[in-house]
Structures are given as structure tokens and as C-alpha cells.
Image (cartoon, rainbow, N blue to C red):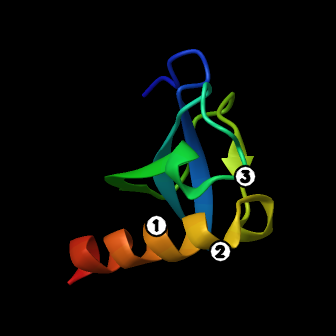
Amino acid sequence: MGVKHGKYAYLKVSEDLYAKIRVFKKRDPSSPSAYLFTGVFVKKPPRKAKVFSESDLPEESIKEIKRLMSQFTT
């Protein structure tokens, strides 16, 4: 699975679980609308993929991504 020139990144959810997120480059990186959860979970991200921790993203983005993730996991 490729990462498409930085359009996608991975958010570390837990020790062995990552969520694939879409990164909108033209939007302000500190705004919550710059990141969108794609609905995909992986155990190991691609080698060249950018991996974010929760502290790297704005708090509003984390809240929105976790809200969307809860819909996919239930």
C-alpha cells in the first residue's frame, strides 16, 4: 500500500495499531480540517509513510479522528 506523495499519513493509535489519515496540504496544518480519517486500520504502516503521534496533531483534529474511529470500531 503506497502513500501517494504525502497525501496519506498514519496516526499511531496504540502500540500495534495505526489509523490511515488523509493530509490536505493546502490547508493550515494547525486546523482540524487538514486531516481526515479514511476508515483504514493497519498493524504496520508502510516503510516510507509519515507516522504521526497524537501530540503532533492539533487537539481538535485528534478529537474528530477519535470520534470517527469510534464509529468504525463498533
Whichever of labels 3 and 1 marks the residue nearer the N terminus, that label is 3
Residue 7 lies, in percent from the top left, at 53, 26
Distance of label 2 from label 3 (alpha carbons)? 25 Å
Residue 21 lies, in percent from the top left, at 48, 47
Locate residue 49 relative to residue 23 in the image: left or right: right
Distance of label 3 from label 1 (alpha carbons)? 14 Å
Residue 27 shows in this picture: yes
Q: Pointer 2 and pointer 3: residues touching (CB < 8 Å)? A: no
Where is 25 relative to 15, above or below? above
Query: According to the image, label 3 marks what residue?
Result: 30
**Pair 2/1: label in front:** 1
Whichever of labels 2 and 1 marks the residue nearer the N terminus, that label is 2
- Nearest to the observer: residue 12 or residue 61: 61
Q: Quadrant of residue 67?
A: bottom left
Q: Quadrant of residue 25?
A: top right
Q: Which mark is residue 1?
A: none
Query: Which residue corresponds to the image point at 79% horizontal and 69% vertical from the top-left?
Result: 55
**Pair 3/1: label in front:** 3
Q: Local crowd at mark 3 within 10 Å, few (<14), some, or many (≥20)?
A: some
Query: Which residue corresponds to the image point at 69% horizontal and 28% vertical from the top-left?
Result: 48
- Nearest to the observer: residue 16 or residue 21: 21
Q: Amino acid at mark 1?
A: Ile
Q: Check disc 3 and report its element: helix, strand or loop.
A: loop
- Toward the bottom, the furthest residue is 74
Query: Which residue corresponds to the image point at 58% horizontal and 48% vertical from the top-left?
Result: 10
Q: Local crowd at mark 1 within 10 Å, few (<14), some, or many (≥20)?
A: many
Whichever of labels 2 and 3 marks the residue nearer the N terminus, that label is 2
| Quadrant the N terminus occupies | top left
Query: According to the image, label 1 marks what residue?
Result: 65
Q: Local crowd at mark 2 within 10 Å, few (<14), some, or many (≥20)?
A: few
Residue 23 lies, in percent from the top left, at 55, 37
Query: According to the image, label 2 marks what residue?
Result: 15
